[in-house]
Amino acid sequence: MNPIAGNTSFLSPEESHQVDAALLDSHEKFLTRLTISSLRLLQHISHSVHTPLEELTPEQVITWFEEDSRRRREQGPEAAFLRWDR
């Protein structure tokens, strides 16, 4: 099962609120949001390439990004997983 299928955001409003409430500086809050979002994206990539998250390689991640970019160029922005307009 894809852990983030159908989500339009990598960070839920509740998680964002938790980060806002954390006793962190603004740059630490940014890094926390980035880290949670990165985890979600890596979970999606792991699912897509049928590889456990712990076994993902940098090469698999790069290849996934190349394929997502190719889909965007060839089929339009809606075909890509990463959509910069969300």
Image (cartoon, helix red, strand yellow):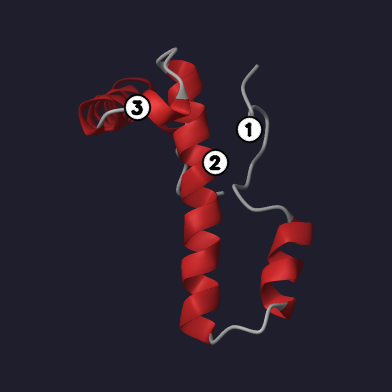
Q: Distance between the residues labelled 2 and 3?
A: 14 Å
Q: Is residue 15 left or right of residue 9?
A: right
| Residue positioned most to the top | 50
Q: Which amino acid does label 3 sit on?
A: Leu
| Residue positioned most to the front | 54
Dot 2: within a 10 Å radius of its alpha carbon, few (fewer than 14), some, or many (20 or more) residues? Answer: some
| Residue positioned most to the left | 59
Kindly state the secondary structure of the residue where label 1 is placed: loop
Nearer the observer: mark 2 or 3; the answer is 3
Q: Which mark is residue 40?
A: 2
Residue denoted by label 3: 56
Q: How far apart are marks 1 and 3 (CA)?
A: 17 Å
- In the displayed structure, would residue 13 be above or below residue 78? below
Q: Is residue 36 left or right of residue 19?
A: left
Q: Is residue 12 left or right of residue 74?
A: right
Q: Are marks 1 and 2 in contact (CB under 8 Å)?
A: yes
Q: How many marks?
A: 3
Q: What residue type is labelled 1?
A: Ile
Q: Residue 43 carries which label?
A: none
Kindly state the secondary structure of the residue where label 2 is placed: helix
Residue denoted by label 1: 4
Residue 11 placement (x, y as % from top left): 64, 53
Position of the N terminus, as image quadrant, is top right
Q: Which amino acid does label 2 sit on?
A: Arg
State the residue at coordinates (45%, 28%).
53
The answer to whether residue 2 is visible is yes
